[in-house]
Image (cartoon, rainbow, N blue to C red):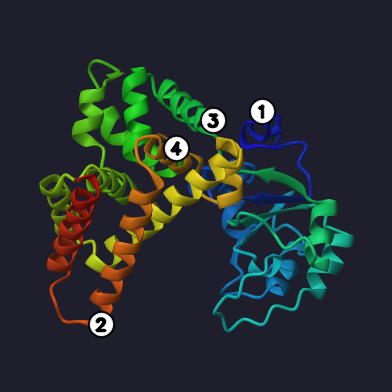
Amino acid sequence: MDFSQFKKQFNPDHLAPIYLVLGDQAYLSQQIKELFVSVIPDAERSMNIGNYDMEDVAISTAVEDAISVPFFGERRLVMVNRPYFLTGQKVKTKVDQNVDDFLDYLKHPEQSTVMVIFAPYEKLDARKKVTKALKKVATTIEIGRLRESEIKQLVSARIKDEGFRINRDALDRLVQLTGGKLTAMMGELPKLFLYNHDSKLIGIDSVDGLVSRSIEQNVFDLVNTVLQKNAKQSMDIYHQLILENDEPIRINAVLIQQFRLLLQVMILQQHGYSQGNLAAVLKVHPYRVKLALQTVKQFNYEQLRDAYIGLIDTEKEMKSTSRSPELLFELFILKFMKKDIKETS
């Protein structure tokens, strides 16, 4: 089930013994945690709620807590975070995870305990015995990749709950500035509520004036000014990123990633892939794919390829010479523009 379905069905009197929350959406994870915590009375929480990070603590410790009798209460809540042993990821940790106790627990979960496993990953390793066993018994809540319409719906619902309204263009702009990231959007709302306290209406002007631009949005703008051969605007955006304490090598790396994405989207689209399929195949946020599709309509393969190769060369120089990164980026812009002028003359 997804988050909306879970929220509608949530009944404190009828909870499953084990839940698996799958996906990396910090805001939704926090909402789910708060719902489960609300089940335990305030006076009992210090004794009957356990919170365990698997990169710091062994799963056997969480299992020991789960099989314990509730202390002066009817129910225990055990939350397991970052269970990397369910994935194929290699994590730097000193904890040796022996999952045998966990496997035994899954066969006979304690009825007075609710165990909630928060797995902030795109997917689990379905080949693992422990993953198979967990999926058999757990109620799974998927909060991973959300469509833009779902994100807007969640944000709009939060705004409505607070007694506010938001214009459609303002909501679109909020999505744009935050790169379509739900957690970032929710984090910006308190400022908008405070500023629009009297009118209770959030307009595009307040969004433009108050919402912080994500590095992805700044880089998206930078990509377009580079492709449009606007040297001055490109350098203005680049210098703004530097002022915001983004390192030149990181900016260049994000630009390389963006141009690689544009090339991938262009090629796959030519092979018949839809917007939804592209997001799944490329494993990127659907909003990034949407923006990429808008961009590739305006430029050709050669332009994207030349910019990509030029940025790769710039990164090599940044790592191998003592020349100013800003100067190297300016040289990239000039070379890219010069090449285009020669080809069109």
Q: Nearer the viewer, mark 3 or mark 2?
A: 2
Q: In which quadrant will I find the N terminus? A: top right
Across and down, in percent, residue 285 comes to 49, 45
Q: Are marks 4 and 2 in contact (CB under 8 Å)?
A: no
Q: Which mark is residue 8?
A: 1
Q: Are marks 1 and 2 in contact (CB under 8 Å)?
A: no
Q: Is residue 307 visible?
A: yes
- Nearest to N terminus: mark 1 or mark 4: 1
What type is the residue that disc 1 sits on?
Lys
Q: Residue at x 69, y 78 (%)?
A: 97
What type is the residue that disc 3 sits on?
Glu
Across and down, in percent, residue 207 comes to 26, 30
Q: Residue at x 31, y 24 (%)?
A: 170
Q: Which mark is residue 293?
A: 4
- Nearest to N terminus: mark 3 or mark 2: 3
Q: Which residue reaches farthest right?
A: 107
Q: Residue at x 17, y 68 (%)?
A: 328
Residue 196, quarter of the rendered image: top left
Other-residue count near label 1 (Cα within 10 Å), few / some / many at <14 / 14–19 / ≥20: few
In-front residue for pair 95/35: 95
- Nearest to N terminus: mark 4 or mark 3: 3
Query: Rounded to the nearest whole Å, what is the CA distance between mark 1 and mark 2?
Result: 56 Å
Q: Which mark is residue 150?
A: 3
Number of disc labels: 4
Q: Secondary structure at mark 3?
A: helix
**Residue that label 2 marks:** 320
Q: Is residue 193 above or below residue 18?
A: above
Q: Secondary structure at mark 4?
A: helix
